[in-house]
Amino acid sequence: MAFGCLSALLWSKRRFNRMTLADILKAYADGQRDFSGITLKIESGFECDLRGVDLSGAVLVGSYLPYAKLQRTHLVATQLQYAELSNAQFQTSTLDEADLSGANLTYANLSGASLRGAKLQGANLHGAFLERADLTGADLTGAVLTRGRCNGALFKAAQLAACNCFRAQGLVLDDALCDRTTVYPDGHRNLE
């Protein structure tokens, strides 16, 4: 009997990994919240509502999710490279170790989110809301943080080489790893 249950669980997990966005939205409407480990390229997720889901370890490379409602989601170690996430809502979400390299996060709301150790190389965070976000150890090499709202955000040991922070509001870089290529909020570079 135990083998039958394990077999059913493994079959269910394999079937689950092949879900489409429509399948996920239907399962979500039915109360399902654990979508960890799925592999899916969401090509039409405009304004989709997946608040409170677990997408930890999911592969969503290149997904199209502008204006998505993703508050309180778990995206630990999720692969979101080159995803379209402009204006997406991530308040109090967990994106620790997530790979958002090259993602478009313009005007995304990441207030209170945890992005500890996240990979944001080359990401566009222009105008993003990062109030009280934790970016400890995050890699923002070559990222765009222009006009970001960063009051209370933590950048301890965050890599900001070649990061453009021009006109970012409330950005404190005392504990961040900046170099000669970092553009500070007032537009200068530290050439010393």
Image (cartoon, rainbow, N blue to C red):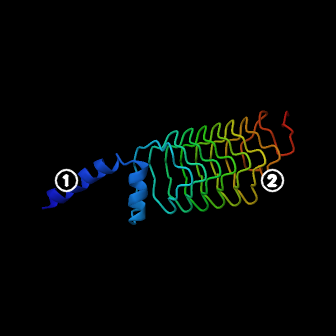
Asked whether residue 110 is in view, the answer is yes
Side of 25 relative to 145 (left or right): left
Q: Residues within 10 Å of mark 2 (few under 14, many from 20)?
A: many
Secondary element under disc 2, as helix, strand or loop, is loop
Residue 189 position, x and y percent, is: 84, 37
Residue lying farthest bottom?
A: 31
**Residue in the foreground of this view, choosing between 156 and 36:** 36
Residue at image point 61% right, 37% down: 102
Q: Amino acid at mark 2?
A: Gln
Alpha carbon distance from label 2 to label 1:
53 Å
**Residue in the foreground of this view, choosing between 179 and 167:** 167
Asked whether residue 34 is in view, the answer is no
Residue 18 position, x and y percent, is: 34, 45
Residue at image point 77% right, 50% down: 174
Secondary element under disc 1, as helix, strand or loop, is helix
Q: Are marks 2 and 1 in contact (CB under 8 Å)?
A: no
Considering the image in quadrants, where does the N terminus appear? bottom left
Residue annotated with mark 2:
169
Side of 189 relative to 102 (left or right): right
Residue 11 position, x and y percent, is: 24, 51
